[in-house]
Amino acid sequence: MIAVIQRVSEASVKIDDAVKSSIQEGLLILVGIEDADTIEDISWLTSKIVNLRIFDDNEGVMNLSVKDVGGEIIVVSQFTLHASTKKGNRPSYLKASKPDIAIPLYESFLKDLEGVFEKPVQSGEFGADMKVGLINDGPVTILIDTKNKC
């Protein structure tokens, strides 16, 4: 499972020109799922995200988590995070899970994230053509791949 975590001052997801979800200060998370991902990956990643200290404290040091600052979270599924660009110029998405595997894992990720975060998490819509808007604060962008836990 790959997650791109962006600290944002605001973020939103539009589908068919209508706002589906929006947040103010918090995290925009783009998540890509592959067949090898497990419930253990979800559990490890959700805990890591919620406790990631990437918000400034009173002294301007990134020492606070999204929970500490009372922020919000919005999650968007993005199979293109698993693009392979090793051969040619057209990315291959063979590593990305098909919907029958990805959707249940994505839904489990959202549910687990809400449980660890202890408040509702906003989201896009799996498989939809989404327009994601954000103001990246910092900018701060972190890439986490659950296959590189050690």
Image (cartoon, rainbow, N blue to C red):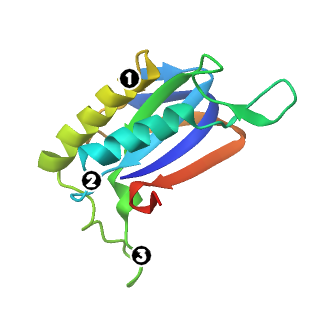
In the rendered image, which residue does mark 2 sit on?
Answer: 37
SS for tag 3?
A: loop
Q: Residue at x 24, y 68 (%)?
A: 94
Q: Earlier in the sequence, mark 1 or mark 3?
A: 3
Q: Earlier in the sequence, mark 1 or mark 2?
A: 2
In the rendered image, which residue does mark 1 sit on?
Answer: 114
**Looking at this view, is 109 or 137 the one in front?**
109
SS for tag 1?
A: helix
Residue 72, above or below 141? above
Q: Amino acid at mark 1?
A: Glu
Residue 70 position within the rendered picture, expressed as x and y whole percent measured from the top left: 60, 16
Q: Amino acid at mark 2?
A: Asp
Between the residue at mark 1 and the residue at mark 3, the CA separation in whole angstroms equals 33 Å
Residue 38, above or below 27? below
Q: Residue at x 63, y 32 (%)?
A: 8
Residue 110 position within the rendered picture, expressed as x and y whole percent measured from the top left: 33, 30
Q: Amino acid at mark 3?
A: Thr
